Every structure is written in structure tokens, then in C-alpha cells.
Amino acid sequence: DVYKRQMYSSIKKNWHPTENSGAGKVVISYKIKRDGTIIEPKIVSSTNKALNKSAIEAIKKSSPLQPLPKRCKRDLIEVSFTFSYNLE
């Protein structure tokens, strides 16, 4: 849906891993408040600790996102986002 695409685009724009961090995958969970504020980002899993900081920073820099859609009846949603970095 549109909200997910906007969220993905914002986070992707703010993610800047360094080449020397190496390849890997990081899964981060976080919560989005009704006003779009991102809170409580945390690493769920990681195959490369060198990518962790840039992934968390991308989430933090993306806050606030757009407010949650009106059709969402909850005031807080939990989301997981997977960062994958390949050097090929």
C-alpha cells in the first residue's frame, strides 16, 4: 500500500552503509505512533554487526514518517524492516 511504499522509500533514502562494513542483513523492529513518530528501534537479528549502526540511524533519521492512515484504528503499530547489503 501507499503508506508502506512511502515508509520504505524514506528509510532507504536515509540508509548509508559504508563499503568496508561488508555484506549482511539486519532486521530492526520499531513502533510508529499515530503522528508518524518512530519509537523504540531495536535490532532483532543481524548477520553483520558493522551494519547495525547505519541501519538504526536510517530508522531514526526517517522519523517522523507520514501520520498513520485514518483506516488504521490503532494509535501505535509495530513494524519490522530488513536491511540487506550486498557487495556484488
Image (tube, rainbow, N blue to C red):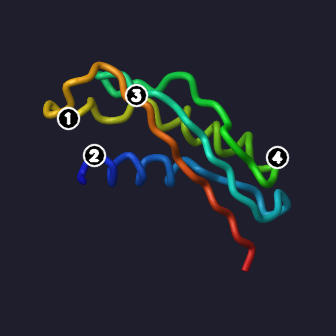
- Nearest to N terminus: mark 2 or mark 3: 2
Out of 17 and 83, give the one closest to the viewer: 83
Provide the secondary structure element on which disc 2 rests.
Answer: helix
Task: Tell me the distance, in whole angstroms, between the alpha carbons under discs 3 and 1.
Answer: 11 Å
Residue under label 1: 69
Q: Residue at x 33, y 54 (%)?
A: 5
- Amino acid on which disc 2 is placed: Tyr
**Dots 1 and 4: beta carbons under 8 Å?**
no
Provide the secondary structure element on which disc 4 rests.
Answer: helix
Can you say whether 66 is above or below 73 in the image?
below
Task: Tell me the distance, in whole angstroms, between the alpha carbons under discs 2 and 3.
Answer: 12 Å
Q: Which mark is residue 32?
A: 3
- Amino acid on which disc 4 is placed: Lys
Residue under label 2: 3
- Amino acid on which disc 3 is placed: Ile
Q: Is residue 56 left or right of residue 5?
A: right
- Nearest to N terminus: mark 1 or mark 4: 4
| Horizontal and vertical percent position of residue 85 | 68, 64
Residue under label 4: 49
Q: Residues within 10 Å of mark 4 (few under 14, many from 20)?
A: some
**Dots 3 and 1: beta carbons under 8 Å?**
no
